[in-house]
Image: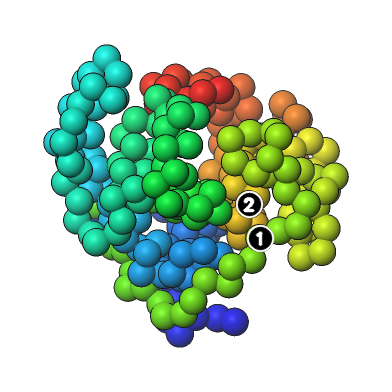
Amino acid sequence: MPHPTSIAPSYEGSGVAIRRDLRESHAQILDTIRSPGSWLTGAERRALAEESRAALACGLCRARKEALSPEHATGTHDAVTDLPEALVDLAHRVRTDSGRLTRSGFEKTLASGVAVEVYVEAVGIIAFVAGVDAFCRALGTPPFTLPDPLPGEPDRHRPAGTRSDVAWVPMLLPEDASGPEADLYPNLPMVPNIAKALSLVPAHARLLQAWTASHYVDLKHLSNPTVGRDLDRLQIELVASRVSAINECFY
């Protein structure tokens, strides 16, 4: 069902022509932020987006980043919402120090009362916001204005067939996808782990695939080194590798 108002991200002042698929992808991210999801309301998802941005100026996050171990720094986050402390901490850690996320930290978050489904949905929102913010920063334009949240309750849909023996969080593997998720990995010759990472929240997994297709290459072409854009595939991978290294990506 279409939402009552459309989203139109602004690139004013960039002086750059933005491809249609990129504009549509960014609008979809903003619509996701404002809408009720599987486990979080629209207000909670928007609040996570706000905290994600606030983390960039947070004193505790800065102290953690400078410390030998993030656990050496103590204090409280410069929170801007009334989200539970555990979700505020998750938003700030994922946005500012994702390279040092640990299994023990993940388990501590769950022990604080954050359900694993909520954890995955929250990480998805935080990551999508970081992506669109980075795009705007590259253009030299302000971050997109976060839309007002839409009313409604989460649908609390958890896909059948998820496995807990693959990663920290349960994931739905291609061979186990069925029912509403039967088309979750459409005709993909290979499915990298990153495409499965958010599959506990299928809408996030679908959005990640759409984002990948517009900003990188369609996953169905992932193993084909001849598929590129204005940059050829080797140039794309060089940029991606450099960015991953700077961001201390696990891979």
- Is 198 on the left or on the right of 187, as rendered? left
Q: Is residue 249 above or below residue 26?
A: above
- Is 223 on the left or on the right of 246, as rendered? right
Residue receiving disc 2 = 200
Of the pair 142 and 125, the residue shown nearer to us:
125
Q: How far apart are marks 1 and 2 (CA)?
A: 7 Å
Question: Who comes first in sequence, dot 1 or dot 2?
Answer: 1
- Is 70 on the left or on the right of 197, as rendered? left
Picture quarter with the N terminus: bottom right
Of the pair 211 and 239, the residue shown nearer to us:
211
Q: Label 1 sits on what residue type?
A: Arg
Residue receiving disc 1 = 158
Q: Position of residue 233 (x, y in %)?
A: 63, 27
Q: In this view, does 96 lie above or below 234?
A: below
Residue at 59% across, 68% down: 156
Q: Is residue 251 above or below residue 158?
A: above
The part of the image, by quadrant, that contains residue 237 is top right
Q: Label 2 sits on what residue type?
A: Leu
Q: Where is residue 87 in the image (x, y as percent from the top left)?
A: 35, 50
